Image: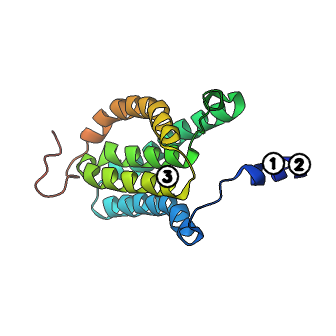
């Protein structure tokens, strides 16, 4: 990276309002990645081979969508035209939860709670505005939803992967 570009990037970086909380915000997405890895291992131990392969592949596909949209925004500056800032962290967060919900849709209350808390943390720290986060969710959400809809029939065909009390065929 060129020194002038590095200086400009560092100067534009938001300063967190509470520096002590900054590591927590930085740890949310890696912790979500570890959760997905752990759930894939749990599926392997339970003999759900389709989910063992499908969950990581779905995650990679969803992350490709999130990072592609971040790249296009960075290259074209579309969000900047509207005075907004694309939230790559928010896009990656939504992509990871979407990948999990394709395979384990009964986890949606956790996904909603963690996502709302994470976005509230980003707002409180001053990383993004509510408009940045909503615009990012809208732009990333549609392609993620379309991809999830296309992958959902594959996930439904798996056998015995629902927790007790859940019908895997519904």
Q: Nearer the viewer, residue 154 or 167?
A: 167
Res. 133 visible in picture:
yes
Assess disc 2: are there few (<14), some (14-19) or many (≥20) residues with their C-alpha within 10 Å of its C-alpha: few
Q: Quadrant of the C terminus?
A: top left
Residue 8's label in the rendered image is 1
- Between the C-alphas of marks 2 and 3, the distance is 29 Å
Assess disc 3: are there few (<14), some (14-19) or many (≥20) residues with their C-alpha within 10 Å of its C-alpha: some
Q: Position of residue 83 (x, y in %)?
A: 62, 33
Residue drawn at point x = 18 percent, y = 45 percent: 168
- Between the C-alphas of marks 2 and 1, the distance is 6 Å
Q: Nearer the viewer, residue 85 or 47?
A: 85
Q: Secondary structure at mark 1?
A: helix
Q: Are marks 2 and 1 in contact (CB under 8 Å)?
A: yes
Q: Secondary structure at mark 3?
A: helix
Mark 3 vs mark 1: give the one in front: 3
Residue drawn at point x = 44 percent, y = 49 percent: 96
Q: Secondary structure at mark 2?
A: helix
- Between the C-alphas of marks 3 and 1, the distance is 23 Å
Q: Position of residue 54 (x, y in %)?
A: 39, 46
Residue labelled with disc 3: 123
Q: Nearer the viewer, residue 160 or 63?
A: 63
Q: Answer left or right for 159 relative to 71.
A: left
Q: Quadrant of residue 17?
A: bottom right
Residue labelled with disc 2: 4
Q: Nearer the viewer, residue 107 or 20?
A: 20
Earlier residue among tags 2 and 3: 2
Q: Answer left or right for 81 relative to 155.
A: right
Residue drawn at point x = 56 percent, y = 43 percent: 87
Residue at far bottom of view = 20
Does residue 159 lie above or below 77 as drawn? Answer: below
Q: Answer left or right for 169 relative to 158.
A: left
């Amino acid at each position: 990276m060129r020194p002038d570009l590095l200086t400009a990037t560092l100067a534009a970086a938001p300063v967190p309002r509470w520096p002590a909380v900054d590591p927590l915000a930085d740890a949310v997405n890696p912790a979500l990645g570890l959760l997905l890895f752990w759930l894939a291992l749990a599926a392997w131990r339970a003999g759900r081979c389709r989910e063992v392969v499908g969950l990581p592949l779905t995650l990679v596909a969803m992350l490709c969508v999130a990072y592609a949209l971040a790249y296009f925004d960075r290259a074209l500056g579309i969000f900047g035209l509207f005075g907004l800032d694309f939230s790559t962290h928010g896009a990656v967060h939504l992509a990871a939860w979407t990948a999990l919900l394709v395979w384990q849709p009964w986890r949606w209350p956790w996904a909603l709670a963690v996502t709302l808390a994470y976005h509230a943390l980003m707002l409180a720290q001053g990383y993004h505005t509510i408009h940045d986060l909503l615009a990012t969710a809208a732009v990333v959400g549609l392609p993620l939803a379309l991809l999830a809809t296309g992958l959902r029939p594959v996930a439904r065909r798996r056998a015995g992967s629902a927790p007790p009390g859940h019908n895997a065929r519904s």
